[in-house]
Image (cartoon, rainbow, N blue to C red):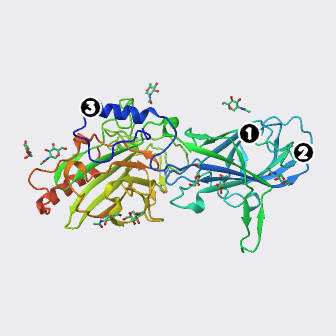
Amino acid sequence: MEFCVMPISGFFPKVTAYTLLLFLLLSCSSTEAYDALDPTGNITIKWDIINWTPDGYVAVVTIYNFQQYRHIQAPGWTLGWTWAKKEVIWNMVGGQTTEQGDCSRYKANLPHCCKKNPTVVDLMPGTPYNQQITNCCRGGVLNSWVQDPATAASSFQVSVGAAGTSNRTVRVPKNFTLKAPGPGYTCGPAKIVKPSKFVTADKRRTTQAQMTWNVTCIYSQFLAQKTPTCCVSLSSFYNETIVPCQTCACGCQNVTQPGSCINPKTPHIASVVPSSGKTNYTPLVQCTNHMCPIRVHWHVKLNYKEYWRVKVTITNFNYNMNYTRWNLVVQHPNFNNLTTVFSFNHKSLNPYASINDTAMLWGVKFYNDLLTRAGPMGNVQSELLFQKDQATFTFEKGWAFPRRIYFNGENCVMPPPEAYPWLPNTSSSRPVSTFNLVMTFLSAMTFLYGYA
Ligand SMILES: *[C@@H]1O[C@H](CO)[C@@H](O)[C@H](O)[C@H]1NC(C)=O
Ligand SMILES: *[C@@H]1O[C@H](CO)[C@@H](O)[C@H](O)[C@H]1NC(C)=O
Ligand SMILES: *[C@@H]1O[C@H](CO)[C@@H](O)[C@H](O)[C@H]1NC(C)=O
Ligand SMILES: *[C@@H]1O[C@H](CO)[C@@H](O)[C@H](O)[C@H]1NC(C)=O
Ligand SMILES: *[C@@H]1O[C@H](CO)[C@@H](O)[C@H](O)[C@H]1NC(C)=O
Ligand SMILES: *[C@@H]1O[C@H](CO)[C@@H](O)[C@H](O)[C@H]1NC(C)=O
Ligand SMILES: *[C@@H]1O[C@H](CO)[C@@H](O)[C@H](O)[C@H]1NC(C)=O
Ligand SMILES: *[C@@H]1O[C@H](CO)[C@@H](O)[C@H](O)[C@H]1NC(C)=O
Ligand SMILES: *[C@@H]1O[C@H](CO)[C@@H](O)[C@H](O)[C@H]1NC(C)=O
Ligand SMILES: CC(=O)N[C@H]1CO[C@H](CO)[C@@H](O)[C@@H]1O
């Protein structure tokens, strides 16, 4: 879905079905792992050999999340590779392999891992200090680069034996795999690059790695093969129609099956919902027409002379998930004149220097950066104020609605353009009547807080 680039200007009412189909076929036929809103987004794994040892080396491996808005949430990353020779891992700091493997060829002093293809995970917060290194021990959680570069990297140290002991004899590992935690990332081959330089904390001395190689991994929603996890609903002050999320936007296969979703009106079932303690990451959603864990509602709220105002509400329908450090990416042509965002952080993304139509929104720390699980508290909201550019501004043809929305990097299912609320014929830019406002407010309230 993600690499199906949708036409972004207007809603192509004049385009014939045939041209549209052709366009979709053309733009969807390429399955290359590439995200139009974050074209250079990648995860880079840097492997720095710090020193050589009698039978190998000690390296610090760092995973950098260079993706603007895609993060890795609990239960965290898993990194795998295949050794080129018969290397073993003597010891690790700030990470561990999930299996030791067969170390029977060693007698007294057993390695940490003897597998040909080790799998490494991060340690958990609270690891004893003598087993930590900088940037370790966050349970494999990586923030997105825009939200917090300081926690967008994760490191561990590995002591490798039975390996090359100089830059001429060492062999780079092969077949890197990164799971986050499911599929989705494809990693290229390790490339030997210029040795990294490290500056001491007081900036008075620079040291450098003996040797460095880099691996780049790229995400593709196609590989992740996920059903959509998010949908968009729309409303406006100028038309009382509320356009709901598309029916079955996130699948309906087993709706009738008992236990496939939770009806909030049957509290005895809702109370069986697993809560604290258990870590179950499969979504357990509230029964709705769309069955999505996340709904984003865009309400065109007010029309001022020089500004217009939108209210954005994100609702969590998943009983199994508190979304920490959530983010939203929204594409709309008026983001070049976004004036104020109330109660969310924001940053404009400029994937193509000349077009400034995309912004990233995320929660304010300790205030609304946690989107709690489904229930009365399971939503966050904010209002956006845009300055009108009189040349392009209009309420017609759904112009005021977003072109594209991502929640945590996943494309949200939009309603079909023909269903968008229309502007009534007569009142194109007349100031809002109070009656209308009250009606829209009431219906929006019923919609947002009444259970579907
Ligand atoms: C990975 O991302 C970094 C930071 O945005 C960028 O400098 C680098 O060129 C990217 N690498 C690839 C292979 O795209
Ligand atoms: C290997 O090390 C030698 C010095 O010991 C250096 O001259 C050479 O450039 C290094 N080669 C690589 C690939 O790092
Ligand atoms: C790496 O993966 C490819 C494809 O999965 C496989 O053909 C190849 O044998 C693997 N190489 C090693 C060294 O495991
Ligand atoms: C290797 O990765 C590091 C860290 O991301 C980066 O600073 C460096 O530029 C990369 N080197 C190359 C040649 O891509
Ligand atoms: C739906 O239920 C059937 C029977 O219980 C099961 O085999 C199937 O995997 C389920 N499908 C999904 C998408 O959960
Ligand atoms: C979500 O957070 C609430 C309150 O902090 C907690 O009681 C609940 O167990 C958490 N649920 C999950 C699935 O993490
Ligand atoms: C994009 O628009 C935002 C909001 O008006 C503005 O702050 C930012 O400077 C603009 N960026 C560019 C590159 O024009
Ligand atoms: C509101 O929009 C809907 C389309 O979603 C349309 O059917 C309806 O006629 C519009 N109402 C008015 C008053 O224009
Ligand atoms: C809007 O105008 C068109 C013709 O211009 C007319 O057919 C339609 O009925 C009008 N709709 C409303 C809601 O007045
Ligand atoms: C009305 C207004 O402020 N328009 C500005 C919107 O943003 C573009 C580019 O960012 C400016 O060129 C316009 O002047």
**Direction front: furthest residue:** 354
- Which mark is in front, 1 or 3? 3
Q: Rounded to the nearest whole Å, what is the CA distance between mark 3 and mark 2?
A: 70 Å
- Tell me where residue 256 sits by quadrant: top left
Instruction: Work out which quarter of the rendered image holds the C terminus and state it.
Output: top left
What's under tag 3, amino acid-wise? Answer: Ala
Element type at marker 2? loop
**Residue at the image point whose x is 40% and y is 33% from the top:** 26
Q: Name which of mark 2 and mark 1 comes first in the sequence.
A: 1
- How crowded pointer 3 is (Cα within 10 Å; few <14, some 14-19, many 20+) is rated as few
- Which mark is in front, 3 or 2? 3
Question: Up-down: is 213 above or below 263?
Answer: below
**Residue at the image point whose x is 26% and y is 55% from the top:** 299
Q: Which of the labelled discs sits on residue 152, or is there none?
A: none
Q: Is residue 166 left or right of residue 264?
A: right
**Residue highlighted by disc 1:** 99
Question: Up-down: is 364 above or below 48?
Answer: below
Q: Rounded to the nearest whole Å, what is the CA distance between mark 1 and mark 3?
A: 55 Å
- Tell me where residue 313 sits by quadrant: bottom left
**Residue highlighted by disc 2:** 109
**Residue highlighted by disc 3:** 17
Q: Is residue 180 visible?
A: no
Q: Name which of mark 1 and mark 3 comes first in the sequence.
A: 3
What's under tag 1, amino acid-wise? Answer: Glu
Q: Rounded to the nearest whole Å, what is the CA distance between mark 2 and mark 1?
A: 17 Å
Element type at marker 1? loop
Viewer-nearest residue: 310 or 131? 310
